[in-house]
Amino acid sequence: MPKPRLSKRDPERTEFARAQRLQANEFSHDVWQMVRAGRMLGEKFRREYPLGPYTLDFVCIELKLNIEIDGEDHLTEEGKKHDSLRDAYLARLGFFVIRIGGFRVTQNPQDVRNQMEAIVLRLREKTPLPQPLSPKRGEGS
């Protein structure tokens, strides 16, 4: 199976993502306030981001982290099957997916934030830092 490409843009998918942003529920709004504008440990997140055949709730491209806020639709057999296919697709692209029940966002937002921060930190540790182009003063020759 060929590896899906990240860079292909479909105007219909982009319009769908824009519409989703405008119709965001309370759960999504609350999580967006946690992650927008570098509020999640300085990382840049995008909201309702089209990727392949899917629209991702909250994604940090740099860390390849996708945060999905699951409502009632995700609890059905059809929803679970759809999520499984979506998660497998994203895994092939190297993404780590967090699924958070929407009810948890309102019941315990600090716990949700702590969970997301812990995963961001873990992914940062796995991501090698770029090597400096030249030695710092006092190092090397």
Image (cartoon, rainbow, N blue to C red):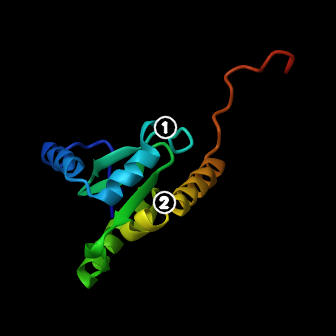
Question: The N terminus appears in which quarter of the rendering?
Answer: bottom left
> In the shown orientation, is residue 64 left or right of residue 8?
right
Q: Compare marks 2 and 1 and give the one earlier in the sequence.
A: 1
**What SS does tag 1 mark?**
helix
Residue 89 on image: x %, y %? 35, 63
Q: Amino acid at mark 2?
A: Pro
The answer to whether residue 99 of the structure is visible from this angle is no
**What SS does tag 2 mark?**
helix
Task: Name the residue: 31% across, 42% down.
Answer: 7
Residue 45 on image: x %, y %? 42, 43
Q: Is residue 105 above or below residue 42?
A: below
Between 131 and 18, which is closer to the camera in this rendering?
18
Q: Is residue 62 above or below residue 84?
A: above
Q: Residues within 10 Å of mark 1 (few under 14, many from 20)?
A: few
Between 26 and 121, which is closer to the camera in this rendering?
26
Question: The C terminus appears in which quarter of the rendering?
Answer: top right
Q: Quadrant of residue 101?
A: bottom left
Q: Residues within 10 Å of mark 2 (few under 14, many from 20)?
A: some
Q: Amino acid at mark 1?
A: Gly
Between 52 and 56, which is closer to the camera in this rendering?
56
Task: Name the residue: 26% across, 58% down.
Answer: 25
Task: Tell me the CA gap for discs 2 and 1.
Answer: 18 Å
Numbered circle sitting on residue 38 = 1
Task: Name the residue: 42% across, 56% down.
Answer: 66
**In the image, which is nearer the foreground, mark 2 or mark 1?**
2
Residue holding disc 2: 109
Task: Name the residue: 65% across, 38% down.
Answer: 129
Name, please, the residue furthest toward the front: 107
> In the shown orientation, is residue 76 left or right of residue 135?
left
Q: Are marks 2 and 1 in contact (CB under 8 Å)?
A: no
Numbered circle sitting on residue 111 = none
